[in-house]
Amino acid sequence: MRRFRPYFSYLRAVRGPLIGAIIAGVIYGVASGAGLPWMIKEVFPQIFSEEAARLTNLQLFFVALWLPAIFFVRGVAGFLNSYLIQLSGVRVLEALRLDYFRKLQYLPLSFIQRQTSGDLISRGLADTNQLQFSLTLIANDGLKQPAALLGAVGFLIWAAFNEQGVVLVLICLALIPLCVFPIRYVGRKLLARAHQIQAQLGSVTDRFTENLSAAREVRAFGLEEAQTQRFAVETRGLITYQMKAVKYAQSLTPAIEIISACGLALTLIYAYRAGVRLESFLAIITALYSSYEPIKKLGALNNEVKRGISALDRLEVVLNEPVDITDPADPVPVGRLQGEVHFDGVGFSYRTGDRVLQDITVQIPAGTVCALVGPSGAGKSTFANLVPRFYEVSSGRITVDGIDIRKLRLADLRANIAVVSQEPVLFNDTIFNNLLIGRPGATRDEVVAAARNAHADEFIRQLPRGYDTVAGERGTLLSGGQKQRLALARAFLRNAPILILDEATSALDSQSEQMIQDALRHLMIGKTVFIIAHRFSTIRDASLILVLEQGRIRAQGTHAELYAGNPLYRTLYDRQHPAA
Ligand SMILES: Nc1ncnc2c1ncn2[C@@H]1O[C@H](COP(=O)(O)OP(=O)(O)O)[C@@H](O)[C@H]1O
Ligand SMILES: [Mg+2]
């Protein structure tokens, strides 16, 4: 139980409904445990005593009505208890899920890459669900069921001393399951109808998947909050369906009980007519029936605690993971940077592996086009990813305009950088909104201008709804070249002083590449550009080329210098240009 203590703070936000639920639960518990049998003892003698023979039919009717009345109070209290506890539960779930999702937005990319997205999703959906269930069940049944059990057992002990009904007690025991099974059967059937929940759960999952596959875009474009808000809307939808199912499931039991109470009342009348003294029998059967549920529930509670703890373990893998790439305590205030980048003795290794970059020292003046070449796995992408602080350097430092990037707010640093990656990700939103994330304040004209610069305007206009066409899950409606041009348009719109192009043109056919080359040359003007490309045509004109191999800079210079003086560069180049 101590294990859950930090999470009971989630219950504080739902104090109102929770207290209401617990009060209703205690009323329910006392009414079912002791109230019912006691009332039977009080009501029955009125009917079966000597004077009772003088009761009119109307009087008899009112006396018999006592029993359904008790079931009514118990049923309504039970319904309120369950409904309010579920309401608190879904609110807790909502808060827990949002905290988990928000945490995923801010965790370093390296953490996301170490996990499978399916696993992160099931923690965020199934395990948060389990935890809220455990928390509310413990809070609720921990009070309600002992109250009911104490009431019922107390009555039985009292009855055992005062009545001679021990044999009847045993017969009653055998009857209890017969009352419970039909109720549970119909309850399950009704719950199975709540298919909508699964559908909505699916769309929450999809939002998750999309977000995780766009982890880099979220960080690069500062979408952390916007993404969390969108997720909040889907989660609210799910809650609506869940509450519908709760209403079905929770009104069923009281309804069945009220009906059986009416049946019991009829039996009473029959018993009166037959002249049978039944009050002891019925009081005991009721007390036994009432103690059955608390025993069942308290048994289940134990399992629930175990399930809750294992869900908590899985959630804490994410919730307790330190966000180690954060804003500094005392950030250097900056606006638009010039874009002079300096790697100063930088070393880097991914969490588990070997040194991926070693002793990288290079000065890139503002406005320089710097190309990174080298065999696959040399560390080119890693090099580029260190500049926006997607990963933290293991040693040395990186400065922009002479300021250590760890001294800048992450949002300030990343606002000065535009990233175009090999597989740009589009959100399932209109083309226009997909471009707008490049610079959220941009006007429609600016968005169109950016698209035109990226040679994207022509094909966008040919789409069924132009800029308002929905791109589809991960942009499946668009070709690789089209997505690439949209990514470039985002970068145009962002107009950041530092531009990172990581194999941004690698997946293109030669005709669209020609167009994109054109767009790129335009985009690169006046910016500090890090360009990684398969094709040397893109990088031959770079003013600085770094030749990387096994995480080290082997040579640097212009194309002419390197081609003349560096065998590795010449080999890489000649492999693509056999004629040259
Ligand atoms: N997220 C990662 N986690 C662990 N190792 C990685 C990760 N990304 C890349 N690596 C490793 O780092 C090395 C450099 O990779 P990378 O920078 O992608 O090379 P390049 O872009 O030059 O092909 C490779 O050995 C690669 O396997
Ligand atoms: Mg790479």
Image: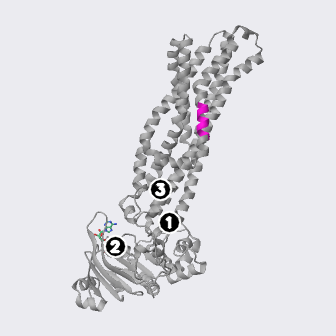
Could you tell me what secondary structure mostly forms the magenta stretch? helix
- Look at the numbered disc 2 and say if its residue's Cβ is closer than 8 Å to ligand 1: yes
Can residue 22 be found in the magenta stretch? yes
Tell me, yes or no, if residue 31 can be seen here. yes
- The relative height of residue 485 versus residue 213 in the rendered view (above or below) is below
Classify mark 3: helix, strand or loop: helix
Q: Is residue 103 left or right of residue 443?
A: left
Tell me, yes or no, if residue 250 can be seen here. no
Can residue 469 be found in the magenta stretch? no
State the residue position of label 2: 382
Q: Which residues are magenta?
A: 20-28
Q: CA distance from mark 1 to mark 2?
A: 22 Å
Along the viewing direction, whichever of 372 and 100 lies nearer the viewer: 100
State the residue position of label 1: 224
Q: Amino acid at mark 2?
A: Thr
- Mark 2, other Cα within 10 Å: few <14 / some 14–19 / many ≥20: some
